[in-house]
Amino acid sequence: MSMREEAIKLAVAGFFLGMIIGDAITAVFASTDGIVLAAPELSEKYGYVTAVIIQTLLSGVLGAVAFGATIVYHMEKYSILAATGIHMAIAYLTMLPIANILWWTGRTVEGNVVIIVMTLCMYTTIWFSVYMSYRIEIQKINESLERKRSGKE
């Protein structure tokens, strides 16, 4: 499978996952009386049903971009740090306008700062996790090579 086909496959899966995750997060954070699947401000502007459709589709777009962009981790020309930075930039530049359109940030400076801080924390964690998994894998390879050199295998 080519990288392009893999990216498309990831984006399609990400679209559906993004719809589910976006609606679930909105239900948790926007619901005060019963389950609500769109921010109240979005519902006031477009009506509840249209707001839910907009919310669901844009969450899908965010998921598609975020998942599709993970293909950057498969490109050997990028270091882990570079791949993480590229992915973060793509995801953040997609998330910020969508978050504002959907009123996830309340369209305030504070809300946007929260998004920036959450994004930085999330990607620091992602980078550290990937770095540690690669480090452990390299350690296993080195141990295996050492055993072969010493004749213990």
Image (spheres, grey):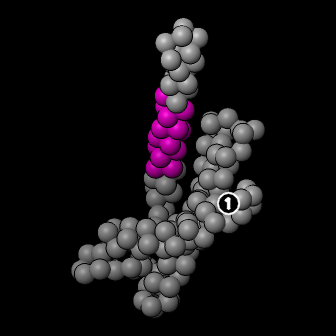
Is residue 40 left or right of 88 when viewed as pictured? left
* 58 in relation to 69, above or below: below
Residue range in magenta is: 118-136
Is residue 121 a member of the stretch shown in magenta?
yes
Q: Identify the image quadrant of the N terminus.
A: bottom right
- Mark 1, Cα crowd under 10 Å, few <14 / some 14-19 / many 20+, is some
Q: Residue at x 53, y 82 (%)?
A: 54
Is residue 46 left or right of 28 when viewed as pictured? right
Identify the image quadrant of residue 69: bottom right
Q: Looking at this view, is 49 or 113 the one in front?
A: 49
Identify the image quadrant of residue 43: bottom left
Q: Which residue is mark 1?
A: 6
Disc 1, SS:
helix
Q: Residue at x 58, y 60 (%)?
A: 67
For the question of whether residue 86 can be seen, the reply is no
* 128 in relation to 109, above or below: above
Q: Looking at this view, is 144 or 5 the one in front?
A: 144
Q: Main secondary structure of the magenta part?
A: helix
Residue at the extreme left of the image, as rendered: 33
Residue type, label 1: Glu
For the question of whether residue 147 can be seen, the reply is yes
